[in-house]
Image (cartoon, grey):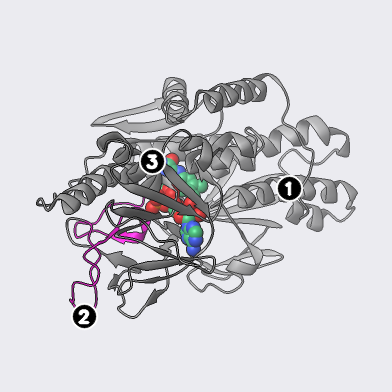
Amino acid sequence: MSKEMPQSKPHILILGAGFGGVYVAKRLLKQVRAGKIDLTIVNRTNYFLFTPLLHEVATGALTPGSVAEPLREVFHKTNVQVIQGNIDSIDAAKKTATISGTPILYDYLVIATGAETNYYGISGAEKFSLPLKNLLDAARIRSRVIDSFEKAALSNDPAERARLLSFAVVGGGATGVEMAAELSEFAEAIAKRYYREMNWPADEVQISIVDTGPELLQMFAPKLRKTAMKHLQKEGVALHMNSSVTSVSADGLTLSGNISIPAATVIWSAGVKAIIPKFEGTQPVLVKGRMTVDNHFVLTDASASNTFNTIFVLGDAAGYPTPVPMLAQVAENQAKVVASNLLASIAGRPLSGFIYNSKGSMVSLGQWFAIGEIFSLKISGRLTWWLWRTVYLFKFASFKKRVRIMFEWSLAVFFPRDITKITGE
Ligand SMILES: Cc1cc2nc3c(=O)[nH]c(=O)nc-3n(C[C@H](O)[C@H](O)[C@H](O)COP(=O)(O)OP(=O)(O)OC[C@H]3O[C@@H](n4cnc5c(N)ncnc54)[C@H](O)[C@@H]3O)c2cc1C
């Protein structure tokens, strides 16, 4: 079955409802009078995922439902059509995208499919480590941590217990660091509260971060990197710098120089690669694995035949002429330009370019501590942590989610974290 759209109104089809896709749709809704365009958004899940707080789900500070907003709620009382389905393929010549077997006609296509975990072909990495990209990943990490404690409680073998209680995070970027810091507090708290009677040596629970660089958080100023590393070391996190992972197994990690880190739990935050949908016929040009776009976000095609002149790509999947980091705030900023370029295209007006001005970024290092760079200001400590939480809280569109998150954060401060293990691991 093919979904024909009325010819009079242009049909904009958005593939991917993450930061790029959802913000393009929101922007269009702001700029266009209701009924002037047909708008459809497609996503694999039926919700928008707020990735910056995913590490808190992995450590039980937040429940999964708090960081996800159902798309039908986001677009409630609008004329946006929401489709939950898989993007099978795109046929630019026929102006069709096939979603879970159903072809959908479009006039303009927006691709915002984001990125997935990159294991760089390292032996055992995909099989034995846990990624942190979606809600299921976060739930799996939480289960694995709890399960490791339960198994360690049963083991009389000190080496096996050490392996079970060792948690390694690969990748010292913002995601890996936030995950390790939060994990360190979570593991220490549950060890003290629930497994005290085991008489494990105090340092038996071990959290490590492995990174190829000499310092963590390369995107921050040297002063903040040092502050972050000092803070993590004070919290007992072992930092393996200038180390590349050569293999991962059920026993743990092997690093360059044949160094082994026994660890039953390895969390992989070492990098991502763009998700490229399947194209029938004309193929997109890929540079560094991302879909190349011109400075108006129009997809470049290999044959320069104009087949893609109604296809726009943004966010993690797009390779913009001036390189930009794979960040939510980049996707959000690009969405503004893509939305106005879509409208300019429809009206036959000239399209605009994009300049990325970072508003700064912050990284939390567990409860009560964060570092941040806001414009040229370098800040760290409790106040930065409070600012970090406030900024993210106000990013949520729905008031209901904000209240829920505030409530769960308060619970996590005053009460022990829940160690009910629901998903199997
Ligand atoms: C754990 C974590 C923490 C992060 N923290 C921060 C942070 O603090 N600050 C920051 O700025 N950035 C952060 N990021 C990066 C940020 O999430 C991304 O840069 C941003 O989401 C990119 O937006 P996007 O629209 O390109 O992709 P996404 O937001 O990933 O959206 C892509 C969407 O496309 C859907 N999709 C993909 N393939 C298909 C398919 N075949 N069929 C159907 N649907 C499909 C996906 O389900 C997804 O919903 C973090 C990322 C992670 C994983």
Q: Is residue 155 above or below residue 396?
A: below
Residue 143 badge = 1
Give whichever of discs 2 and 1 has the lower sequence position.
1
Kind of residue indicated by mark 3: Arg
Q: Earlier in the sequence, mark 3 or mark 1?
A: 1
Residue at the disc numbered 2: 303
Report the residue at 79% width, 49% height from top: 147
**Disc 3 vs disc 2: which is toward the camera?**
2
Instruction: Assign the C terminus to one quadrant of the image.
Output: bottom right
Q: Secondary structure at mark 2?
A: loop
Let me know if residue 171 appears in the view: no
Residue range highlighted in magenta:
297-326
Does the segment drawn in magenta span residue 254? no
Numbered badge on residue 225? 3
Disc 3 to disc 1, C-alpha distance: 31 Å
* Of residues 159 and 37, the one drawn nearer to the viewer in this rendering: 37
Q: Tell me where residue 39 appears, x and y as whole percent.
A: 37, 48
Q: Which one is nearer the viewer's eye here, 31 or 174? A: 31
Alpha-carbon neighbours of circle 2 within 10 Å: few (<14), some, or many (≥20)?
few
